[in-house]
């Protein structure tokens, strides 16, 4: 019988620890499929974050390095500069990248490091139990914002992709989502393009992926997908913000 679908070689056989309905797993699969399709699994080094995806080094079937919270772009910089022929990516949540790691992500773009970042924005600190992140929406409840985020005391959610798109060294910036099959196909295209930009040596690339955290949002997986569509996409519009052609 013809094989019509099989698990990508880009993932190991390890069962993931993610909660039911968490979209981290879908994003892992897309990255892994892209690495396999571009035939770069053997040359790729991923940098795992601190957050729910802290064990990503067990799931991606390529060389992996763990970094301290928020520091993945700095670790990736060292790897890429010492091994320029390798393909280097970071996989980071919004607490990791937009809070403690805000400086690292700005300066990796500022230095135009030739690495790729997969930025998983689920608008909350997942691993540590649902505290407010810089990306938490106004009115969204978190353990540290039990009445919902209030802009008068905590400001407004940070639009990382828009911010990075103002930096010349960030040559590929796109925001995607994985809340339905059509969106997942588009997300994969963006991830592939970001890695192609690195292969062509064109500069820093980032794909922000809107993601769900049913556990800390206090929703069923299905409700969480709808909440993402109704609440996250209006504030974090999807689409490409920068291509290498525009960055010239
Ligand atoms: C230096 C340091 N500060 C704080 C923490 C605690 N910590 C671990 S994970 C995390 C937040 C993770 O949230 P996010 O990056 O959004 O990833 P998610 O778990 O939602 O995927 C925090 C604050 C830590 N491990 N190290
Ligand atoms: S806590 Fe949230 S982000 Fe972490 S695995 Fe569970 S659903 Fe996913």
Image (cartoon, rainbow, N blue to C red):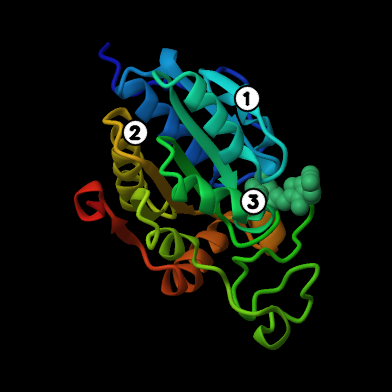
Residue at x-position 62% and y-position 20% = 14
What percent of the width, then of the height, locates residue 105? 54, 50
- The residue wearing badge 1 is 65
Residue at x-position 44% and y-position 28% = 32
- The residue wearing badge 2 is 198
Horizontal placement of 148 versus 224: left or right?
A: right
Q: Earlier in the sequence, mark 1 or mark 2?
A: 1
Horizontal placement of 192 versus 146: left or right?
A: left
Question: In the displayed image of the protein, which residue is found farthest to the left?
Answer: 245
Per the image, label 1 sits on a secondary structure element best described as strand
Q: Nearer the viewer, residue 83 or 15?
A: 83
What percent of the width, then of the height, locates residue 200? 26, 30
Give the mark toward the camera: 1 or 3: 3
- The residue wearing badge 3 is 101
Is the Cβ of the residue at disc 1 closer than 8 Å to that at disc 3?
no
Residue at x-position 31% and y-position 51% = 182
Q: Earlier in the sequence, mark 1 or mark 3?
A: 1
- Give the Cα distance between marks 1 and 3: 17 Å
Horizontal placement of 236 versus 48: left or right?
A: left
- Give the Cα distance between marks 2 and 3: 21 Å
Badge 3, how many Cα within 10 Å: few under 14, some, many 20+? many
Badge 1, how many Cα within 10 Å: few under 14, some, many 20+? some
Q: Is residue 172 visible?
A: yes
Q: Earlier in the sequence, mark 2 or mark 3?
A: 3
Ligand 1 has an atom within 8 Å of the beta carbon of the residue at disc 3: no
Residue 64, picture quadrant: top right
């Amino acid at each position: 019988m013809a094989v019509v679908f099989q698990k990508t070689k880009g993932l190991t056989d390890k069962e993931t620890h993610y909660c039911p309905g968490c979209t981290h797993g879908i994003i892992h699969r897309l990255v892994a499929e892209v690495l396999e399709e571009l035939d770069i699994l053997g040359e790729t080094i991923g940098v795992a974050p601190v957050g729910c995806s802290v064990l990503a080094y067990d799931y991606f079937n390529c060389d992996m390095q763990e970094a301290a919270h928020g520091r993945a772009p700095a670790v990736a910089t060292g790897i890429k500069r010492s091994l320029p022929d390798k393909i280097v990516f970071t996989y980071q949540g919004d607490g990791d990248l937009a809070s403690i790691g805000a400086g690292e992500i700005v300066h990796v773009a500022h230095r135009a490091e030739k690495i790729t970042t997969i930025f998983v924005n689920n608008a909350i600190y997942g691993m540590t139990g649902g505290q407010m992140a810089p990306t938490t929406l106004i009115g969204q409840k978190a353990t540290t914002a039990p009445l919902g985020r209030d802009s008068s005391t905590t400001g407004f959610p940070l639009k990382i992709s828009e911010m990075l798109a103002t930096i010349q060294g960030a040559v590929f910036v796109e925001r995607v989502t994985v809340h339905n099959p059509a969106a997942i196909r588009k997300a994969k295209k963006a991830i592939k393009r970001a890695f192609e930009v690195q292969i062509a040596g064109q500069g820093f690339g980032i794909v922000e992926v809107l993601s769900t955290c049913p556990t800390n949002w206090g929703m069923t997986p299905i409700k969480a997908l709808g909440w993402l569509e109704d609440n996250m996409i209006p504030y974090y519009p999807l689409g490409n913000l920068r291509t290498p052609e525009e960055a010239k």
